[in-house]
Structure formats: structure tokens, C-alpha cells
């Protein structure tokens, strides 16, 4: 249910783009992102930080797109967001009790609380690299491909990249944490 809710603004953007073009799609995306925050608040009684940042960027850069009639601003939004996440991941390696990847994924992966901090740091650096590269890819597509190609890259390409990355890191962590669950107590205390 949560994933469908999170994908709703993207679906609304794509439908509006196909029917009415980039400017209507931008306005629809802006409204849909605010609606997502409302749904988040009703369901969770809080605003998830990533949704809040994404919404603020959509409102700021989408507003610039509509006011200046220049879609480049909206096209920059994924890159700005991805690079902010990359920076947050990198900084969290040194700041706070746990790296960002650990804080977000540990509750989702059974038996992962015993994973060494170095495993989480490595994954955190992989996050930073992944988000940096994906942001650069968005800029390249935005600058060198057609508007339509960028829209489809934003909706399908970025989504597919996130899915593949999530599945790969989930499998990688599951293998490591499963070994912790089946390891005898003596070997766990020796390490």
C-alpha cells in the first residue's frame, strides 16, 4: 500500500504529461506531492524527511518551471534530490550513531542488528556512489535527450534503477545477516 501511495505522484505526472504536456504535468506533480504529504501525515502522524525534501524541491523547481516556462528546472529536481541523499549518506558515515543506510534498512532486515559497522559503512558508501551516479545520469538524459525521453527515464529508468539497487542490497544484507542468525553463539562472541 505504501509503495503504491509513493508511486501515485509519478503516475499522475506521467499521465498528465502524455495527455497535456510538461507544464500541466508539472502542476499535477506539485499537487500530487502535497497530497502525498497529507496522506503521510494522516497515516503516520509525521512527515517522512525524504518525502518532505522531495516535495519542497518539486514545489520550488516546479514553480520555477511554470513561472519561467522552462522545463529545465523540473528536470534538475531528481539530480538535486539524489545528490542531497548522496551527501546525507556520506556525512552520516561520520555523524550520528549509525550510517544512514543502517538507520533506514536495519529495521527491515531480520537479524541485521549483529552486522558489523564496517558492513553498514560499505553499504553507505555504495549508496553515496549510486545516488551520485544516478543524479549524473539524470542530468545527462535531461541535457542530451528529448523531453519525452527524459520523462520516461524519470518515471521508468530511475524507478528500475532503484528497484534493482534495492533488491541487490537487500539480498547482500540478507546473506550476511542470515549467517548471523545461524551462527553458533560461541563463534559470534569470538568475533
Image (tube, rainbow, N blue to C red):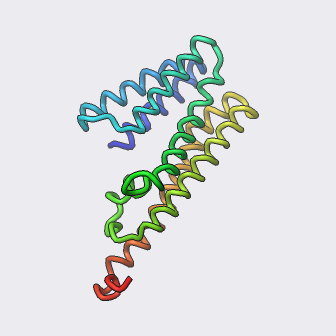
Q: Residue at x 57, y 24 (%)?
A: 17
- Image coordinates of residue 85 in percent, x first then y, are 51, 43
Q: Quadrant of the N terminus?
A: top left
Q: Residue at x 39, y 57 (%)?
A: 98
- Image coordinates of residue 96 in percent, x first then y, are 39, 52
Which of 141 and 8 lies nearest the eye of the viewer?
A: 141
Relative to 28, residue 110 above or below:
below
Quarter assignment of residue 157 = top right
Residue closest to the far top:
67
Q: Quadrant of the C terminus?
A: bottom left
> As drawn, is 102 to the left or to the right of 110?
right
Q: Residue at x 38, y 38 (%)?
A: 49
Across the whole image, how many numbered discs are drawn on residues? 0
Residue closest to the far right:
144
Quarter assignment of residue 46 = top left
- Image coordinates of residue 44 in percent, x first then y, are 25, 38
> As drawn, is 101 to the left or to the right of 140?
left
Relative to 94, residue 8 above or below:
above
Q: Residue at x 42, y 39 (%)?
A: 50
Amino acid at each position: 500500500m505504501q509503495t503504491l501511495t509513493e508511486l501515485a505522484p509519478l503516475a499522475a505526472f506521467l499521465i498528465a504529461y502524455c495527455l497535456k504536456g510538461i507544464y500541466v504535468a508539472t502542476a499535477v506533480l506539485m499537487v500530487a506531492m502535497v497530497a502525498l504529504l497529507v496522506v503521510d501525515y494522516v497515516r503516520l502522524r509525521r512527515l517522512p524527511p525524504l518525502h518532505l525534501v522531495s516535495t519542497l524541491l518539486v514545489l520550488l523547481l516546479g514553480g520555477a518551471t511554470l513561472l519561467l516556462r522552462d522545463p529545465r528546472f523540473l528536470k534538475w529536481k531528481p539530480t538535486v534530490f539524489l545528490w542531497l541523499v548522496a551527501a546525507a549518506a556520506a556525512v552520516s558515515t561520520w555523524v550520528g550513531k549509525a550510517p544512514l543506510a543502517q538507520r533506514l534498512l536495519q529495521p527491515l532486515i531480520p537479524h541485521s542488528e549483529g552486522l558489523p559497522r564496517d558492513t553498514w559503512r560499505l553499504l553507505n558508501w555504495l549508496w553515496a556512489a549510486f545516488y551520485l551516479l544516478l543524479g549524473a545520469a539524470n542530468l545527462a538524459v535531461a541535457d542530451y535527450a528529448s523531453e519525452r525521453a527524459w520523462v520516461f527515464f524519470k518515471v521508468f529508468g530511475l524507478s528500475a534503477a532503484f528497484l534493482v539497487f534495492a533488491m541487490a542490497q537487500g539480498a547482500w544484507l540478507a546473506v550476511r545477516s542470515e549467517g548471523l542468525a545461524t551462527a553458533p553463539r560461541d563463534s559470534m562472541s569470538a568475533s
